[in-house]
Amino acid sequence: MASAAATASRTSPRGRVDKRQAILDAAFEVFAERGYVQALVQEIAERAGVAKPTVYSHFTDKESLFRATLTATAQAVMDTNIAVLDRMRGPGDDLRATLNDVAYQLVRSCCDRRSRSLRWLTYAQVARFPDLIEVVQGCTSVRIAEAMADRLARLTVSGRLRPCDPAVAAEQLLALVTGPLETRSRLGTRKVTTAEMRALAQSAVDTFLRAYAAD
């Protein structure tokens, strides 16, 4: 009996973490489908496979659940994109090919359902939760630009790019990569084809290297 209790005690924290993540995943799905106002905590609990009181044991109310959901999703998007940027640490002999692939993966990430839904939810609730703009942009735009600047600085030091301000170069490259998407996707309401995404990525890299490639 004591051994079973000890085992339960050891596994309890892990189970609690798993339930919290399941709730956050389910909450993002429901918020994305129904919006903040129409989303029901009962439906979130059902999708997460937990009882409604369990949701409230992790999050005090729907507002705190919404804040936690968008923050967790923004961090997940950030992690995905920074992993993409890590390819720039060792670009190999063909810098253009590496940058084309990195740009394409960033475009894909920006166009995927998770990123689109995150933007929609953040913009739709900006009046109710104005602070979430800073949270989401801090995890995505700001942190990704910082990571990009770090990778570009390494390429400058190694002589692959001409001397420049890496923060400015990163801002410009990201603008070239993601800027046209809002128009092409009609603010996220139109699916951008793979061919379009590749063309956008290659065009962005071509323009960037014309300005920053080492002589």
Image (tube, helix red, strand yellow):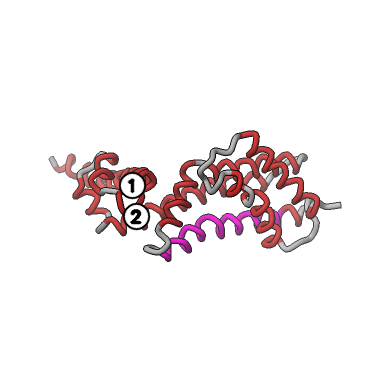
Earlier in the chain: of badge 2 and badge 1, it is 1
Which of these two is toward me, 23 or 107? 107
Q: Main secondary structure of the magenta part?
A: helix
From mark 2 to mark 1, how far is it between C-alphas?
Answer: 8 Å
- Tag 2 residue: 66
Q: Is residue 162 left or right of residue 116?
A: right
Q: Specify whether residue 187 is painted magenta.
A: no
Circle 2/circle 1 CB separation < 8 Å: yes
Q: Mark 2: which amino acid?
A: Phe
Viewer-closest of 91 and 212: 212
Asked which quadrant contains residue 62, the reply is bottom left
Q: Going 15% across and 43% down the picture, which residue do you hit?
A: 2
Say if 20 sits above or below 192 in the image: below
Q: Does residue 61 appear anywhere in the picture?
A: yes
The stretch of residues the image draws in magenta is 130-154
Q: Quadrant of the N terminus?
A: top left
- Going 56% across and 57% down the picture, which residue do you hit? 141
Lateral position of residue 24 relative to residue 206, left or right:
left
Considering the numbered disc 2 on the image, is that residue within a helix, a strand or a loop? helix
Going 42% across and 65% down the picture, which residue do you hit? 130
x and y percentages locating residue 64 in the rendered image:
31, 59
Q: Position of residue 126 (x, y in %)?
A: 42, 61
